[in-house]
Structure formats: C-alpha cells, structure tokens
Amino acid sequence: MRFQIVDLEQAWWGKIEDFSVVRNRFLETLHDEDYILWKSGDEEMPESLLDYIRRLKPEYPYYDILRINLVDDRWVEWANPRYSGSLVSNRVRYKGRLHEQLVPSKPYGKIDIPIIHNQHGPRPYNSGWKQSLAYRPVLAYKKFMDVMIGR
C-alpha cells in the first residue's frame, strides 16, 4: 500500500478551527490509490505497524487502527482500547469540527497492531465521570458486548 504519514500540527500552516475541513483538504489532493496515515505529536507508530501497512493490499476506503491510550505514561481503563480511522483514502470525507467522523462509515478494515497515544498534561476535554468508580459498570458492559460480538 502506498501511504504517507501526516501530522496535522506540522503539516498545516495555520490554527485549526475545524479538523474535518483540514483533513478533507489533504484528502482532496490524494491520488486515487494512496492513503494518509494520520499521526499526532503524542503518538508513536511501531515499525511493525508500518511494515504491516506497507504489505497491506488495499481493499477498503479506510482502516480503523487499534489505539492504546495512555495518560501521563499510565494505562487508563476508561480510554482503552479504542479503534480510530487513522488510515484513510480519498474515498471518504470527515464531518464534525472536533472528534470528527468518517463518511461513509462502512465498509472499513481493521488493523490490530496498535498506535500508542500517550497524552501528557491536562486533558483539554476531560469528561470527569469516566474516571470515577461509577463508570466501571459501563466499562464492564462495553467489554462484555465487545467479547459477545467478537471485536
């Protein structure tokens, strides 16, 4: 697969007000068989992931890649594990200013070799209750459903 790694903070020239607009501008310039692998400054991409993507025969408009989320070098249950549409072609577009979503959302592929996301410092959109003990039953239910449907 042909792909390029794009870090929006480094590649975009100005302040990002709407992430979907910025991401879509990059996608509009992409050749039909190429993909973008989005990377943030606080993410690490293991060489095993990059090797896998290089060998991947493209089938889908985008691929959800497993993300292991750390906060200040520590595992946080409420944020893990998560998949995110990090490897995308020009056959999809983004909508939403922040926490944008891919359209169309299906079909898509999944890659289980994780990106490591390690956020340091205060979280700009801390939901609060997800760190509380009250959220643990919700986590248990979500995990139960993932296991039941084979995710």
Image: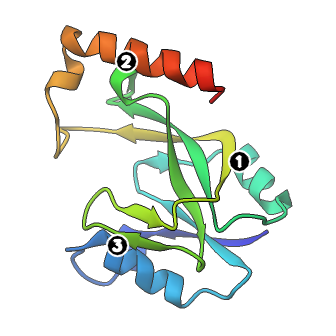
Q: Is residue 84 left or right of residue 125?
A: right
Mark 2 or mark 1: which is in front?
A: 2
Badge 3 amino acid: Ser
Q: Where's residue 79, x and y in %?
A: 37, 30
Badge 1 amino acid: Leu
Label 3 Cα neighbours within 10 Å, binned few <14 / some 14-19 / many ≥20: some
Decide which of 141, 58 is in the foreground and name it. 141
Q: Which quadrant of the view contains residue 14?
A: bottom left
Q: Name the element at disc 1.
A: helix
| Relative vertical location of residue 20 with respect to residue 108 in this rendering, above or below | below
Q: Which mark is residue 20?
A: 3
CA gap, disc 3 and disc 2: 29 Å
Q: Residue at x 30, y 11 (%)?
A: 136
Residue labelled with disc 2? 139
Q: Name the element at disc 3.
A: helix
Q: Quadrant of the N terminus?
A: bottom right
Query: Earlier along the polypeptide chain: callout 3 or callout 1?
Result: 3
Residue labelled with disc 1? 49
Q: Is residue 130 left or right of residue 6?
A: left
CA gap, disc 2 and disc 1: 27 Å
> Taking the image as drawn, is residue 76 in sight?
no
Label 1 Cα neighbours within 10 Å, binned few <14 / some 14-19 / many ≥20: some
Q: Residue at x 65, y 73 (%)?
A: 35
Q: How was the colour assigned to the protein in this rendering?
A: rainbow
CA gap, disc 3 and disc 1: 25 Å
Q: Residue at x 67, y 88 (%)?
A: 31
Query: Earlier along the polypeptide chain: callout 3 or callout 2?
Result: 3
Q: Name the element at disc 2.
A: helix
Label 2 Cα neighbours within 10 Å, binned few <14 / some 14-19 / many ≥20: some
Q: Are marks 2 and 1 in contact (CB under 8 Å)?
A: no
Q: Which mark is residue 31?
A: none
Q: Where's residue 124, x and y in %?
A: 16, 46
